[in-house]
C-alpha cells in the first residue's frame, strides 16, 4: 500500500568572506491523496568552525519558521 511521496529541489549559494550560506528551494508532497507545495529559504551563518546558526522560512501550503544550530562533522 503506497502512502505517498515527496520531492525537494533547491540551490546553494555560499559567500566564504561573509561566512553566509543561502539555500532557496521548492518542496512538493503527495501523502494520502493530499498535496502540498511550498517555497523555502534557508540561511546558515558560521558562528564558529563547524558550527552554524540556522534559520528557515517556508511559505505556501505548508508554512514553517525554523531556528536552530548545525554542527558539521566534516573536515
Image (cartoon, rainbow, N blue to C red):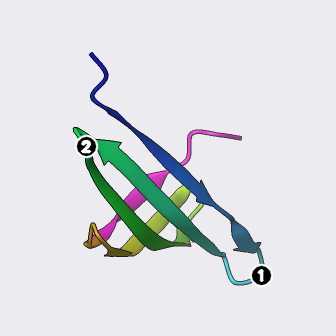
Residue at 27% over, 66% down:
62
Query: Which of disc 2 and disc 1 is earlier in sequence?
Result: 1
Q: Is residue 47 above or below residue 29?
A: below
The residue at which mark 1 appears reads as 17
How far from the left and from the top, in percent, is residue 41?
A: 49, 75
Q: Which residue is nearer to you in this view: 60 or 55?
A: 60
Query: Is 69 included in the stretch rendered in magenta?
Result: yes
Horizontal relation, residue 57 to residue 48: left or right: left
Considering every residue shown, the one lying at the far top of the view is 1
The residue at which mark 2 appears reads as 33
Q: Is residue 71 above or below residue 32?
A: below
Horizontal relation, residue 15 to residue 21: left or right: right
Q: Is residue 22 above or below residue 37?
A: below
Residue at 26% over, 73% down:
63
Q: CA distance from mark 1 to mark 2?
A: 45 Å
User: Could you tell me which quadrant the C terminus lies in?
Assistant: top right
Horizontal relation, residue 68 to residue 7: left or right: left
Considering every residue shown, the one lying at the far bottom of the view is 18
Magenta-drawn segment: 66-75
Query: Is 17 included in the stretch rendered in magenta?
Result: no
| Number of numbered markers | 2
Residue at 69% over, 65% down:
12
Q: Secondary structure at mark 1?
A: loop
Residue at 73% over, 71% down:
14
Horizontal relation, residue 59 to residue 70: left or right: left
Query: Which of pointers 1 and 2 indicates the residue nearer the eye?
Result: 2
> Any mark on residue 45, and which?
none
How far from the left and from the top, in percent, is residue 57?
A: 37, 76
Q: Secondary structure at mark 2?
A: loop
Q: Which residue is nearer to you in this view: 64 or 47?
A: 64
Amino acid at each position: 500500500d503506497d502512502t505517498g511521496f515527496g520531492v525537494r529541489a533547491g540551490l546553494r549559494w555560499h559567500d566564504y568572506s561573509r561566512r553566509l550560506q543561502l539555500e532557496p528551494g521548492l518542496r512538493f508532497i503527495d501523502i494520502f491523496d493530499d498535496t502540498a507545495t511550498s517555497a523555502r529559504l534557508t540561511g546558515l551563518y558560521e558562528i564558529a568552525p563547524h558550527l552554524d546558526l540556522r534559520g528557515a522560512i517556508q511559505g505556501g501550503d505548508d508554512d514553517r519558521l525554523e531556528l536552530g544550530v548545525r554542527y558539521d562533522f566534516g573536515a
